[in-house]
Image: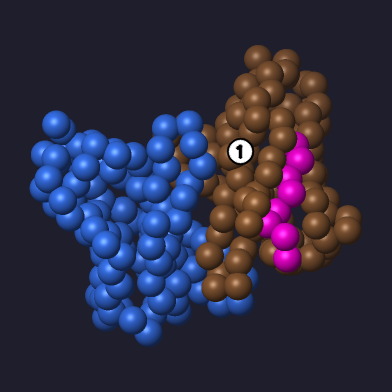
């Protein structure tokens, strides 16, 4: 069984630029999560999708972050414009039948 | 809201000894408690989980115990090996969304 796929693995941008991350969950997983993990901290939930609907986006900074999962499979997370404090690893996870979460390899974002 | 506290923040043990990491949670309705291992630069990986209807679960050298009355759960690793060195995160969740509330992490160092 293939795992959660994410791309790109690394991204370096300057502040005020925009960036987009892509996630492909494990096949058949209806629930998808985007997390932000700052160095030395645990993952922080940004948004949760169930199929193509948003379950919870209460911690998503909506003035600069957006996410979509139009067909209920792949998802994209966008930041526009980026700030220095957005430097982090962005993790995507999908949820299995026993409610366990499986994580992708993450995208390491550096904002200069 | 739910809060998860994790101790210690750093744990150094001699190879072959046991390691114990403890977490407490605040919401008595929490019913799912996973533990994740994260090696440097890699994704969090689920190593064991426990649900509120079970008091203990074992998987080879790893075990988790849950005390619902005291609202705490612990990870036990026996016969530690160098490859056990990593950051370990506990988490708790409740309800149908299974959103995870994460502890701050424990850096486990295995001394040769």
The part of the chain drawn in magenta is A21-28
**From this viewpoint, is residue B20 visible?**
no
- Would residue A78 appear left or right of B42 to someone viewing this image? right
Position of A75 relative to B24 (above/below): above
In the displayed orientation, state which residue is furthest to the bottom.
B53
Image point (42%, 32%), residue name = B40
Residue hosting label 1: A106
Horizontal arrangement in the rendering, residue A74 relative to residue A94 (left or right): right
- What's the residue at 40%, 38% (across, down)? B39
- Colour of chain B, in one word, is blue
**Which residue does the image show at 79% across and 44% down from the upper left?**
A76
Q: Nearer the viewer, residue B92 or A58?
A: B92
Q: Quadrant of the N terminus of chain A?
A: bottom right
Q: Quadrant of residue B75?
A: bottom left
Task: Estimate the x, y position of residue B24 in percent, counting from the top left.
Answer: 31, 64
Question: Does B71 sit left or right of A36 as displayed?
Answer: left
Residue located at (24% from left, 37% from top): B82
- Tell me if I can see residue A20 in this picture: yes
Q: Vertically, is A93 above or below A77? A: below
- Which chain appears brown? A
Judge by depth and name the residue closer to the eye, B99 or A81.
Answer: B99
Rendering coords of residue B29 (x, y %): 45, 79
Element carrying mark 1: loop
Q: Which image quarter: residue B16? A: top left
- Judge whether residue B25 is colored magenta: no
């Amino acid at each position: 069984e293939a795992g959660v796929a994410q791309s790109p693995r690394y991204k370096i941008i300057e502040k005020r630029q925009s960036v987009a991350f892509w996630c492909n969950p494990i096949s058949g997983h209806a629930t998808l999560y985007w997390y932000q993990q700052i160095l030395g901290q645990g993952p922080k939930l940004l948004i949760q999708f169930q199929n193509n609907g948003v379950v919870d986006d209460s911690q998503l900074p909506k003035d600069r972050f957006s996410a979509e999962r139009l067909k209920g499979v792949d998802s994209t997370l966008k930041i526009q414009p980026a700030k220095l404090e957005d430097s982090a690893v962005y993790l995507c996870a999908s949820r299995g039948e026993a409610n366990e979460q499986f994580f992708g390899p993450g995208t390491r974002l550096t904002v200069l | 809201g739910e809060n998860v506290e994790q101790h210690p923040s750093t744990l150094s043990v001699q190879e072959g000894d046991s390691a114990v990491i403890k977490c407490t949670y605040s919401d008595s309705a929490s019913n799912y408690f996973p533990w994740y291992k994260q090696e440097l630069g890699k994704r969090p990986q689920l190593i064991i989980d426990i649900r509120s209807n079970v008091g203990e679960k074992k998987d080879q050298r790893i075990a988790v115990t849950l005390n619902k009355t005291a609202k705490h759960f612990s990870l036990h690793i026996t016969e530690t090996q160098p490859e056990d060195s990593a950051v370990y995160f506990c988490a708790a969740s409740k309800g149908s969304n299974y959103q995870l509330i994460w502890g701050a992490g424990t850096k486990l160092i295995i001394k040769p």
